[in-house]
Image (tube, rainbow, N blue to C red):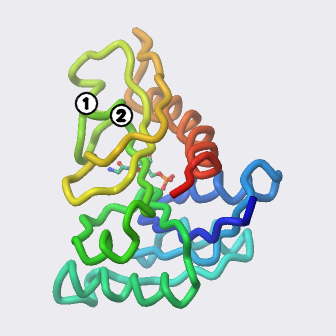
Amino acid sequence: MSVKVLAVLASGSGSNLEAIAQAIVNGELKAKIAVVIYNEPDAFARQRAEKYGIPAILVNHRDYKSRKALDLAIINILEKYNVDLVIMAGWMRIVTQVLIDAFPERILNIHPSLLPSFKGIHAIEQAFNYGVKVTGCTVHLLSLEVDSGKILKQAAVPVLPEDTLEDLQKRIQVQEHIIYPEAIAEYSH
Ligand code: GAR
């Protein structure tokens, strides 16, 4: 099987980025992360990329006049690095059709709920406040409508009676770090 060339887009901590990078190091995922793109100057994802020797490029959305202009700048980088798959890992920007058209069925996203429940921001909090007893995480293809693309993989996570929001968040992230590298390994387009 050929090695998949990935780009990871992250806005924050980058723990999913690290899980994917580590799965590659461990030989569980035959891929290479060619580049990390981050949009928040102080995103910890940048440090994680450095730890794995991956180039990290800041594309600060504040420097662009529109979502489309931001996406065009991102496409420029993705094409330069000959990326096969775009991996959104905590990328907190709404994308435009321009990016989707540039990488049709080649953009994956992870969302911290069992989609189609609890789309959008603060998904874990939404589920927690709703009082569900089971939630989880979902890897899906990106589509223009937020958190609505084809589902590739899911993991269910119980909500325990004594859980705080932070407990639940941690339990979901453990599963994210397992299913995201697996979903990338299994995905062929
Ligand atoms: C992850 O839990 C991911 O599911 C979530 O952001 C977190 C990023 O964590 N994404 C969304 O909420 C997208 N709507 P990380 O930066 O440590 O990988």
| Residue beneath the point at 44% across and 56% down | 108
**What residue is shown with label 2?**
113
Q: CA distance from mark 2 to mark 1?
A: 7 Å
Towards the viewer: 20 or 124: 20
| Residue beneath the point at 48% across and 67% down | 86
**What residue is shown with label 1?**
117
Question: Position of 132 compared to 139: left or right?
Answer: left
Q: Indicate whether 88 appears above or below 155.
A: below
Q: Indicate whether 127 appears above or below 31.
A: above
Query: Which quarter of the figure has residue 12?
Result: bottom left
| Residue beneath the point at 30% across and 48% down | 149
Rendered-image quadrant of the N terminus: bottom right
Query: Which quarter of the figure has residue 6?
Result: bottom right
Question: Position of 102 compared to 7: left or right?
Answer: left
Question: What amino acid type is highlighted by mark number 2?
Answer: Ser
Kindly state the secondary structure of the residue where label 1 is placed: loop
Q: Indicate whether 169 appears above or below 74.
A: above
**Residue 169 position in % (x across, y down):** 45, 34
**Residue 46 position in % (x across, y down):** 57, 73
Question: Position of 32 compared to 98: left or right?
Answer: right
Q: Within 10 angstroms of label 2, few (less than 14), some, or many (20 or more) residues?
A: many
Question: What amino acid type is highlighted by mark number 1?
Answer: Ser
